[in-house]
Image: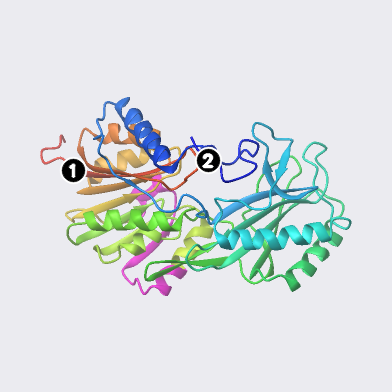
Amino acid sequence: MQKPRCPVFGICGGCALQDMDHIGQMQMKKAMVIEDFKRQKIELSPDIKVYFKDEYAYRNRMDFPIFSEGLGQRMKGRFDKLVHFERCYISNPGINAVFDEVQAWLEKEKNRLDIFDVVKRHGTFRYATIRSGFFSGESSVTFIFNADSQAIDPQKQYLKEFAEKAAVKNVLLGFVRYNTDQSVVNEAEVIKGSDTIAEKLGPLTYNFHTQGFFQSNSAVFMDIIRWIKERIDQPYDVLLDLYGGVGTLGISFSDAAKEIYIVDNNPLNTACAEKNIAANSALNVKVFAADAEKTGTLGIDLAGRRSIFVLDPPRNGIHRKVHTYIKGVRPEKIFYVSCNHKTQAEDIRKLSEIYDLKDFAVFDMFPQTKHVETAAMLELKTQSPV
């Protein structure tokens, strides 16, 4: 046990492990992964490697509810109580810089601003969702308004005044209904700057939408990219990146195959993926805006061609139709990145009839929390059943 760095640890519902030293956190997470795989009759080595970077100042996105004291987080175990703090210790420096700027404005203008009440469910300002590239330093803040507020126009004018003077490059506005609790929206109005920001991952630049998906720990995500790249032993004919987001994995491995295909169903992601292909001159990469389970209908020809798959699905794992597709086309290798090792273990068990688990690693993507990222390498069995 150790003294938590954050003075509101245990009160704030965010971090869960600041009272445990980082080595202990990683040992606990590794043991947790090994046990959950064991439940699926898959034995992982006790010596599997855990990759990590800084235990603080890593997150590149934070969603801060707005209340009478300014920015905060949900109190542990409560939806109706919020706790304020002066700094979020797991947020990267860019996020905390924007946090300070927004907090100072909220305090200065508190008599003019109409703050949403989570119990009475009325008011205007609900969230400030802040994103900042860990390596690029580019930042944005999206203010989420209650769409049912009667004071939207004057409150929007106050927001425009903030944007004019603010140092943060990108300021956006989104709307959600009073009875929902969302901190991102499909469509956000740009008040200042752009609706996308860029992040640097090694020599490559990736644009991502302020309302879309991007990995929350860029430094550890770089470790995942390196881990996979070291295990792609030779060029293939086709690399298929399912659940591909803005193309971070597919574009990073553009030299691993003659043809790269990225499949993602979020138009915010695929629009950025197209931009990233051009920005990084990845001319052999193509994007499909489609559900992963519809990959078999996209006209991607794998017959008689050596192929490799990269999968990074959401927490609920691989769709059953994707399992069927994989078993039908049988890529030589599969790299499976997961933010939920329980569903990953279930998926690997389902694929174990024709695939061997050849390598595995744990990545401490979310220090101070109980969450962890994992990556697996599967190879087609030499004599796999038809």
> x, y (%) of residue 348?
29, 36
- Can residue 311 be seen here? The reply is yes
Q: In the structure shown, which secondary structural element does the residue marked by tag 2 occupy? A: loop
- Name the amino acid, label 2: Gln
Tell whether position 280 is magenta.
Answer: yes
Number of marks in picture = 2
Disc 1 marks which amino acid?
Leu
Which mark, by number, is residue 380?
Answer: 1
Looking at the image, which residue is at 83% across and 57% down?
152
Disc 1 packing (10 Å; few <14; some 14–19; many ≥20): many
The residue closer to the viewer here, 353 or 71, is 71
Which residue is at the front of the view, 118 or 350? 118
Which range of residues does the magenta coloring cover?
Answer: 275-298
Q: Is residue 146 visible?
A: no
Residue extending farthest to the left is 383
Q: Quadrant of residue 357?
A: top left
Mark 1 secondary-structure assignment: strand
26 falls in the magenta region = no
Where 272 falls versus 212 (above or below)?
below
Residue visible at 24% across and 46% down in the picture: 329
- Position of 77 relative to 285 (above/below): above
Disc on the earlier residue, 1 or 2 = 2
Inter-mark Cα distance, 1 to 2: 41 Å
